[in-house]
Image (cartoon, rainbow, N blue to C red):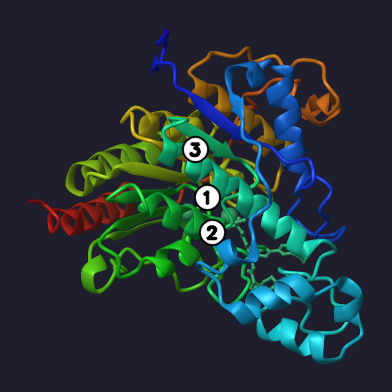
Amino acid sequence: SQSCPDGPKRRVCYYYDRGIAGVDYGEDHVMVPRRVDMAHALIRSYGLLGDMARLRTRPATADEISSFHDEGYVGLLRDVTPEGFAAGGEMTHAAKGFNVGAFAKDDRSVDNPPIAGLWDYCRRYAGGSLAAARALVSGEAEIAINWSGGLHHACRERASGFCYVNDIVVAIHELLGRFRRVLYVDIDVHHGDGVETAFIDSARVMTVSFHQRTKNFFPDGKGLVEHVGVGDGQYRAVNVPLNEGMDDQGYHGLFRPIMAKVMEVFQPEAIVMQCGGDSLSGDRLGNQNLSIAGHAQCVRFMRSYNLPLLLLGGGGYTVNHVAACWCYETAVAIGKEIDDAIPVHCYDSYYRSQGYKLHYPVAKGIKNDNTDFHVTRTMSIVMRNLTHLEA
Ligand code: ZLS
Ligand code: CA
Ligand code: ZN
């Protein structure tokens, strides 16, 4: 195949479902599914659709979703409606038991609202991740992308952190049908707790999460560097907690050596990467200071191992930043350089504040609370844990 700055081009499959853009978590909610539509519009405007095969698929079925999730919970996801929830009867009670809805009636300040079209939304984003996994299993694609997926907090029987169905766990189960060992890498600013828990005692799935761990930051009490997995999964859960303000240089000082060691000791046959854009500088929820180039460098690094690679979205709450980031990472996946100047397209007014450039400047004067002492300590603990897996 043709060569490019990041090595040979790859066969890339891309999932996009217009049925997701209109999903509404509520007008004051921070999660805005339209950002995936914005990323798609950018990807199209850069002409990248011509470099990828489009994944066409049906939404995931209840059976597929039940490969991980509890049946009662799946039933609730299927049946709950905003109106039914608002009625305050049995459905309200059931929903709350699964962490869906407000804890007080009419409280819109809830992480996991009973949104209109919830079941359809779950089926679509999970269907995308499943189809992407299948394209890797069949060998049809070397890299498969679903920016609407990556909802890493969902648990077997409850919603959490804006996530209802854990498309990542469902996709990894699919990959395990063909690949002996699967590596999961999570650069979302939040800890990838739902995925870690699902494979906590598995020798075949290694989970690695880089995340902010500061006072009260969600999910509280998870992702400590000491949490390494249990039973057959011991040392196959890797956690890299960060303080606020991490920059590109500091992030890569950890990311590269840790991931190189992980690749060496675990030797996966496929890689799943959750590319949450809330670790970017200027995010509404995260307090990190990565540039788009720094975030994408993680993708480029994992891509360089030339293994089947599943790229998923996740968080990202400053919509212009996250859309620009996922567009750029799509270009990185393909192996194509794209211009910094954003082409004229339907959403271009969103990029005015960044001068219509893809690569917006990182925030200046942000304090990096990750001291050399803290970084060195985290690194040495993680590296020591990984030596337990050496052959
Ligand atoms: O990783 O911190 C929490 C839980 C609470 C505080 C917030 N209230 C509403 C509920 C109880 C302890 N939740 C986090 C969830 C973060 C999920 C990240 C998902 C992912 O990026 C993957 C997709 C949280 N942090 C910030 C908010 N919730 C939050 C901020 C602002 C708002 C608006 C909408 C809703 C209420 C007002 C909301 C949530
Ligand atoms: Ca993470
Ligand atoms: Zn997040």
Q: How many marks?
A: 3
Q: Disc 1, ligand 3: is the CB inside 8 Å?
A: yes
- The image position of residue 254, as x and y in percent, is 32, 43
Split into 4 quadrants, where in the image is the N terminus? top left
- The image position of residue 307, as x and y in percent, is 34, 34
Q: Is residue 361 left or right of residue 86?
A: left
The Cα atoms of the two marked residues, 3 and 2, are separated by 21 Å
Along the viewing direction, whichever of 68 and 196 lies nearer the viewer: 68
The Cα atoms of the two marked residues, 1 and 3, are separated by 24 Å
Numbered badge on residue 112:
none
Q: Is residue 360 above or below residue 214?
A: above
**Residue designated by label 1:** 188
**Residue designated by label 2:** 152
Front label number (2 vs 1): 2
Going from N to C along the chain, the mark reached first, 1 or 3, is 3
Which residue is painted at 76% across and 15% down in the image? Answer: 343
Q: Disc 2, ligand 1: is the CB inside 8 Å?
A: yes
Going from N to C along the chain, the mark reached first, 2 or 1, is 2
Q: Find out whether the residues at labels 2 and 1 contact each other: C-beta distance under 8 Å.
A: yes
Q: Residues within 10 Å of mark 3 (few under 14, many from 20)?
A: many
Q: Find out whether the residues at labels 1 and 3 contact each other: C-beta distance under 8 Å.
A: no
Q: Outermost residue, left direction?
A: 391
Q: Residues within 10 Å of mark 2 (few under 14, many from 20)?
A: many
Along the viewing direction, whichever of 364 and 385 lies nearer the viewer: 385
Q: Is residue 389 left or right of residue 159?
A: left
Q: Is residue 109 left or right of residue 288?
A: right
- The image position of residue 291, as x and y in percent, is 54, 32
